Image (cartoon, rainbow, N blue to C red):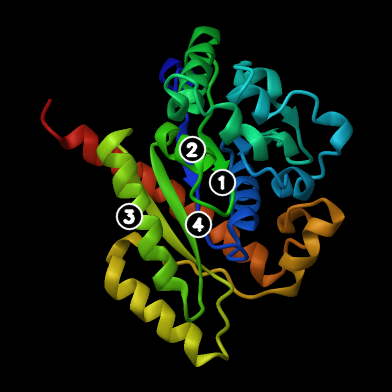
Amino acid sequence: MPDDAARKAPKVIAVANQKGGVGKTTTAINLGTALAAIGQKVVILDLDPQGNASTGLGVPKAQRVTTSYDVLVGERPLADTLVKTLVPGLLLAPSDPDLSGAELELANAPRRSYRLRHAIDRFRRELSARGESCDYVLIDCPPSLNLLTVNAMTAADSVLVPLQCEFFALEGLTQLMRTIELVRGNLNPALAIQGVVLTMYDVRNNLSGQVAEDVRAHFGDKVYQTMIPRNVRVSEAPSFGKPVLLYDLQCAGSQAYAALAREVVRQERGEAAQREREPA
């Protein structure tokens, strides 16, 4: 492996939407799996007290010994939490129900919004010291705009927003964008919008098409071309503790997430090329 690849620091992406049921965790799991399938090294950090990403990746509770709760509250190294998944190249920092009380526990803690950022900065330094690489850290945020989500956005390079193709989608998105702007203004000036991915798209439903048009008109090229269809196999996969790409590779949902992963990688390469062209 070339030295520059060995020293590569991971791109940290917070997968966030305060509205539940939009495919946020499903996107984190399956995008991470699809990225790993094309040779990227990925960590999924489960920051939702419900632990759905941990369950959906088939990691039993007995293996969730050190968790993201310990990283935030106990200040344990992120590397100590990582467990293997069924997917080669994909590691998980599992969740813990105790995360639901983290906001109260950290109420008087200094720099409480930076806890996760410090942990990920340490993780990056440790990777570099060992000459190892990681391409992506995907943070699965809870469906709320609380301290956990603020920690994720403060630690992240960018935010990826899964957006359900339904009537109230844009209304909820406005609130999320306001939070991103607040974090950018007060905690993390470099925070960018990674992109908006349209989920649960139903080609038979005129409303899905209208929502997609509205979102593209508002966000332009920040909306991924790949849309995730409403697909029963995607819904079934978590109950078997598998990403849909392992559950049914040929289904429409798997193919969509594979296409999204390729689009994300192309986006990263394009941005890297643009940075190289910019004057120092």
Badge 2 marks a residue whose secondary structure is: helix
Q: CA distance from mark 3 to mark 4?
A: 12 Å
Rendered location of residue 198, percent (x, y): 49, 68
Mark linked to residue 178? 3
Q: Amino acid at mark 2?
A: Ala
Q: Give the quarter of the image for residue 183.
A: top left
Badge 1 marks a residue whose secondary structure is: loop
**Do we see residue 101 in this rendering?**
yes
The relative height of residue 217 versus residue 177 in the rendered view (above or below) is below
Q: CA distance from mark 4 to mark 2?
A: 12 Å
Q: Earlier in the sequence, mark 4 or mark 2?
A: 4
Q: Residues within 10 Å of mark 2 (few under 14, many from 20)?
A: many
Q: Which of labels 3 and 4 is toward the front?
A: 3
Residue occupying the point 40% across, 72% down: 170
Badge 3 marks a residue whose secondary structure is: helix
Q: Earlier in the sequence, mark 3 or mark 4?
A: 4
Q: Which of labels 1 and 3 is toward the front?
A: 3
**What residue is pinned by disc 2?**
152
Residue occupying the point 74% across, 67% down: 235
Q: In the rendered structure, are the residues bearing label 1 and label 4 in contact, judged by CB atoms less than 8 Å apart?
A: yes
Q: Residues within 10 Å of mark 1 (few under 14, many from 20)?
A: many
Q: In the rendered structure, are the residues bearing label 1 and label 2 in contact, judged by CB atoms less than 8 Å apart?
A: yes
Q: In the rendered structure, are the residues bearing label 4 and label 2 in contact, judged by CB atoms less than 8 Å apart?
A: no
Rendered location of residue 169, percent (x, y): 46, 72
**What residue is pinned by disc 4?**
17
Q: Residues within 10 Å of mark 3 (few under 14, many from 20)?
A: few
**What residue is pinned by disc 1?**
141
Q: Give the quarter of the image for residue 42.
A: top right
Q: CA distance from mark 1 to mark 2?
A: 7 Å
Q: Amino acid at mark 4?
A: Asn
Left or right: 169, with 230 as reference point:
left
